[in-house]
Amino acid sequence: MVSLIVGHKGTGKTKTMIDLANSRAKSSKGHIIFVNKNQRLMYDLIHEIRVVSMEDFDEITNSDEYIGFLYGIISSDHDIDAIFIDSILKHADVSKEDIPEFLARLKVISDQHQIDFIVSLSADLEELSGTVKDFELIEPYGY
């Protein structure tokens, strides 16, 4: 399953993701991965969660490479339950125009490997209305 948390900066998307990831890690039998732009959130997440900082992978410059990167994470760990991707539009030059195809590809990966993806997007829900209709929406705490 692919779930989305959509809203502008300051609406509580990251806080919502942190709480969901921590809660999921406490109850999950699999591993939880949290992909973030940097290491800033590492101390907000419980130690069972693997934090991946995209600052360490600045060679990833587009959504195709990003999908390949996710496949690399998945191939190295067959016990992943969920991957949280915070602020995807700040990673690897992914743009709003890339989002429909990116989410469709995440759905395929999710279905193939039984991994849940929780993705936050800094945008207006109206901007993405056609894109997000097939995905579960999680409201950030700020709404």
Image: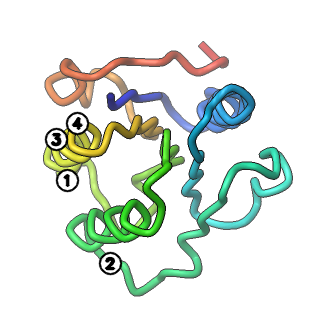
Q: Nearer the viewer, residue 16 or 10?
A: 16
**Amino acid bearing label 1:** Asp
The circle drawn on residue 104 is: 3
Left or right placement of residue 12 versus residue 120 in this view:
right
N-terminal of the pair, mark 4 or mark 3, is 3
109 lies above or below 140 = below
The circle drawn on residue 61 is: 2
N-terminal of the pair, mark 1 or mark 3, is 1
Percent from the top left, x then y, of residue 6? Answer: 44, 28
- Element marked by disc 3: helix
34 lies above or below 124 = below
Percent from the top left, x then y, of residue 114? Answer: 33, 37
**Amino acid bearing label 4:** Asp
- Element marked by disc 2: loop
Q: CA distance from mark 1 to mark 2?
A: 13 Å
N-terminal of the pair, mark 4 or mark 1, is 1
Give the labeled residue for mark 4. Answer: 111
